[in-house]
Image: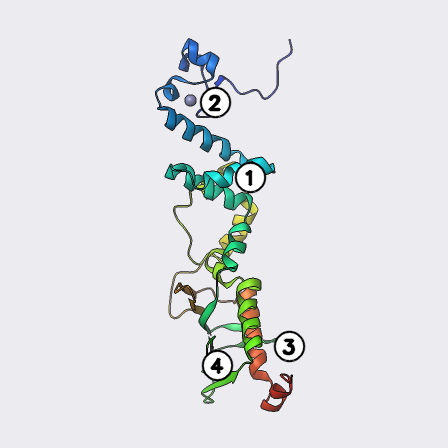
Amino acid sequence: MSKKKNRPHGHYCKICGEYKANEKFSGKGHAAHICKACSRLSAAEKADAMAINRMMGFPMRRLSDGEKKWLQAKMYDKSPEVADTAREIYNICFPYAERNAMKKQLIINTLSFEVHTEVYDGYGDMELADRRFTIDRKSRVLTMTDFCTDSGEQSVTLEGREMSKLLRYIVHTLEIFMWEQDYCLNPDEDDFFTDILLGEGIYEDDLEEKEEALPAEPEGRPSWQVHIEYSSHTVQDISSYVECLPERPEELYLTFMEYFELDEDDFESGFRF
Ligand SMILES: [Zn+2]
């Protein structure tokens, strides 16, 4: 006697997406693939449950253009539950879409970046850094304060185009606005989808990697921190208590250092028109 393999037990309900025993269906419901529990829902509730049930399967495969459009429309659904789920699913299926949309809008007005930990010095050695950098877009002034020395605050004024280029690099390439999320500095405890994906064994590798970056218990002063004010009046504050500087904060550090490693003459000659 041959049996179909891997066929779930029970009868499928198209509303809740579950396989249930036959007695959970009425005669009419059995034919219509709607279980007794779901048949008690209003038409609107049925539609919402079906939409959520449909989108839950999306992260496991590649979506068609039609499915992508449908999901995008659901992000603005009048049911908050449907809209929230659609946004979460969309960000999982298209992780860079949200970033790229944000990048177009973000302009840094002022930035302050402090580093109080060991960093790569750009020449193959580690050094203990104790520095603060600031940028002001309007005055185009970049400053550096080295707390290890008495030299005080040093500053350079950038040419307009050079300043825009630097600020664009920080947003577009270093994606500084995503650092909390990328480096798990502000873990979202209500992230229900993380639980779902963990349960499915999906993205487990990604999450394991991220867990290593989880902040230690705050103790003493941060090893590095960022304060940014954007032109939209949004303020971003990041503090990390993890000893080492992650990749992109380190790139930012080295980028800033380049402006202060040149002596005055070298610097001037680098900006001839
Ligand atoms: Zn059902």
Residue type at mark 4 is Thr
- Residue at 42 percent across and 38 percent down: it is 77
Callout 4: 10 Å neighbours few (<14), some, many (20+)? some
On the rendered image, what quadrant is the N terminus found in? top right
Q: For numbered disc 1, what is the local secondary structure? A: helix
Q: Mark 1 highlights which residue?
A: 68
Q: In the image, is the residue at mark 2 within 8 Å of ligand 1 by its beta carbon?
A: yes
Q: Is residue 121 something that shows in the picture?
A: yes
Q: For numbered disc 4, what is the local secondary structure? A: strand
Say whether marks 2 and 1 touch (CB < 8 Å).
no
Q: Earlier in the sequence, mark 4 or mark 2?
A: 2
The correct choice, above or below, for 224 with respect to 27 in the image is: below
Callout 3: 10 Å neighbours few (<14), some, many (20+)? few
Q: Mark 4 highlights which residue?
A: 143
Mark sitting on residue 145:
none
Residue type at mark 1 is Lys
Quarter of the rendering containing residue 111: bottom left
Mark sitting on residue 123:
3
